[in-house]
Amino acid sequence: MTDILRFLQHRNSSPRLVEPAPSASEMEGIFQAALRAPDHAWLRPWRFVTIAGDRRQDFGQVLERCLRQRNPQAEEAALQKARGAPLRAPLVVVVVARLTDHAKVPASEQRLSAGCAAHSLLLAAEACGYAGIWRTGDPASDPAVMAALGLEANEEITGFIYLGTRDGAGKTLPLLDTADFVSNW
């Protein structure tokens, strides 16, 4: 088994992340890997918004405000969780799907391409010695969150990728039986 295959078989998400996050030069390489995602017709149906440092607190205020708009009855614990969400990691990368009308490439395929870019971002970060986790939840489909991030009418959030250094040991993942997922036609 190659080292790359072993790496792919053992990658897993890490919900507990601490400093340091990848450096700017490391993020350049990570983004270069994400830009290699499958992309029918070279539409480049993705872009990335980074949120780091104090801007994470600002984004937490956005998430709290948007939760209040979605649910005026939200309890304080939920508001606090929304406010603190961006602080779960030293770096948040918002993966944005940029959808274009195209005769041969439907929006669903463009969304999948942006998802592949997000996955490549996670893989590249882990290859650089970092860890991450992909989150969505209600904020990912909230028009007010999208507006606060400056998304255009043809854009949507694919996910929030939290990046940093794994805090503690990685979780042990069960070995899955490929027979449960693969069939012959």
Image (cartoon, rainbow, N blue to C red):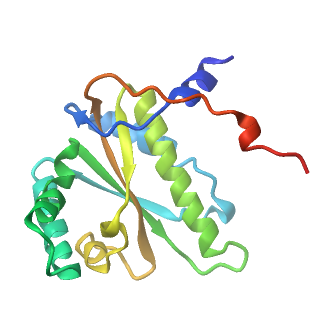
Q: Position of residue 28 (x, y in %)?
A: 38, 41
Report the label total: 0
Q: Which residue is at the front of the view, 63 or 124? A: 63
Farthest residue, direction right: 185
Q: Position of residue 146 (x, y in %)?
A: 31, 73
Q: Quadrant of residue 94?
A: bottom left
> Where 53 falls versus 9 (above or below)?
below
> Where 57 falls versus 165 (above or below)?
below
- Say which residue appears at 20% left-offset and 73% top-offset: 67
Q: Quadrant of residue 9?
A: top right
Is residue 11 rendered to the left or right of residue 90? right
- Say which residue appears at 61% left-offset and 71% top-offset: 108
- Say which residue appears at 60% left-offset and 24% top-offset: 4
> Where 116 falls versus 105 (above or below)?
above
Q: Position of residue 3 (x, y in %)?
A: 60, 18
- Say which residue appears at 63% left-offset and 62% top-offset: 42
Is residue 115 rendered to the left or right of residue 26? right
Q: Quadrant of residue 154?
A: bottom left
> Where 8 falls versus 136 (above or below)?
above
Image quarter where the N terminus lies is: top right
Is residue 157 rendered to the left or right of residue 60? right
Q: Position of residue 182 (x, y in %)?
A: 77, 43
